[in-house]
Image (cartoon, rainbow, N blue to C red):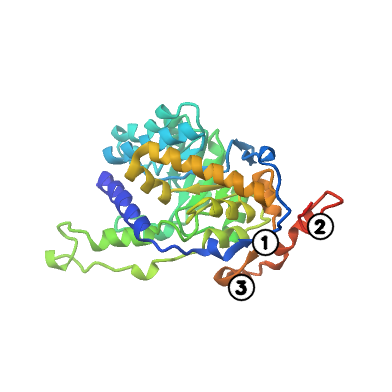
Amino acid sequence: MIADRKDDHVRLAAEQQRRSGAHNQFDDVSFVHHALAGIDRSDVSLATRFGGIAWPVPLFVNAMTGGSAKTGAVNRELAIAARETGVPIATGSMSAYFADPSVADTFAVMRRENPDGFVMANVNANASVENARRAVDLLQADALQIHVNAVQETVMPEGDRSFSGWAPRIGEIASGVDVPVIVKEVGFGLSRETVALLRDLGVRAADVAGRGGTDFARIENDRRLNDRSENGGPENGGRERADYSYLNGWGQSAAACLLDAAGVGVPMLASGGVRHPLDVARGLALGASAAGVSGRFLTTVLDGGAAALVARITAWLDQLAALMTALGARTPADLARCDVLVRGELRAFCADRGVDTRRLATRSRSSSTAPDTIGGIR
């Protein structure tokens, strides 16, 4: 049952990616072009640091899958690509391993194929501290992701229905494991209030994982409506299947979450709808320390294997460095001092949440340190 669900997730996520529209709220963010702001490419470093964690690049392969033979093969290809490009990588939820230890290798393959890389284990917010430690030990993980997914669980026919224990459990895990803990949504976003609570619970970073990428409410509803189990629907004497399609598109975008939670005091990561290197740069400009990608990288692996993903990641990193060169950003953190404009629905969200976006359009003036620098131009 669990293996079938994991295979369904991969299949439906890939189908969703291939038919998804081009627009999301990253498109509401644009850089102010300063024609003489550019620097030398040799002065650009992609290294990023946050919460005591150092990565060679501000891009990572985010949590996807594991728990079946097919998904184990996907994880192998992802791990090879991470090894060849140096990007950090996270496994998918390891709940299947806790239920059935025989599927351990579908997750452990990530460490075996990527022995020296930065690998993150992944558990849900219901995991015991003991199981969190088991996950870390299996992968010799450098960090632990805890995913929160109340909306997905609500739509999932076999999902959890008790969420009140999640926050205290996250605190227990954060203090009970020996690696940094990163809490992530699965595509519905983290509000300012949630990020502040995570800070108080002792997590090292928050991955906002916003709306605009893979929609797990849609995936679980597709699974629900396509269920052909014995008691799955009225044609088999069962109850009529509940349709949760009205929840498609639930939540806040990654861009909205980053702006909403700015200054809370915990490092943030940007994922959810990252489509290309410009979206990575946009996320970094809005305050993220790195950007995570799942859907785009999943379809790349399914279509062309590890070699195709190596080529794509290499191109993304090269193009990100090129963008930083033109923008005058020597480091990923410097992008957060570049002038950006916020428009459309994203600006309306910020207005309702009390976020002043006007300051972002001229912030290079106040952040510049060189005496001959005006408006970010030297």
Task: Give the structural element (helix, strand or loop) at label 1.
Answer: loop
**Residue beneath disc 2:** 374
Question: Is the residue 68 above or below the residue 16 in the image?
Answer: above
- Whether tag 2 and tag 1 are in contact, CB under 8 A, the answer is no
**Left or right: 178, with 41 as reference point:** left
Q: As drawn, which residue projects farthest toward the left?
A: 236
Indicate whether 218 appears above or below 106.
below
The kind of residue tagged 3 is Asp
Residue at disc 3, secondary structure: helix
Identify the image quadrant of residue 349: bottom right
Q: What residue type is labelled 1?
A: Val
The residue that label 1 is drawn on is 32
Crowd around label 3: few <14 · some 14–19 · many ≥20 (10 Å): few
Q: Nearer the viewer, residue 129 or 304?
A: 304
Q: Is residue 203 visible?
A: no
Helix, strand or loop under label 2: loop
Mark 3 = which residue?
352
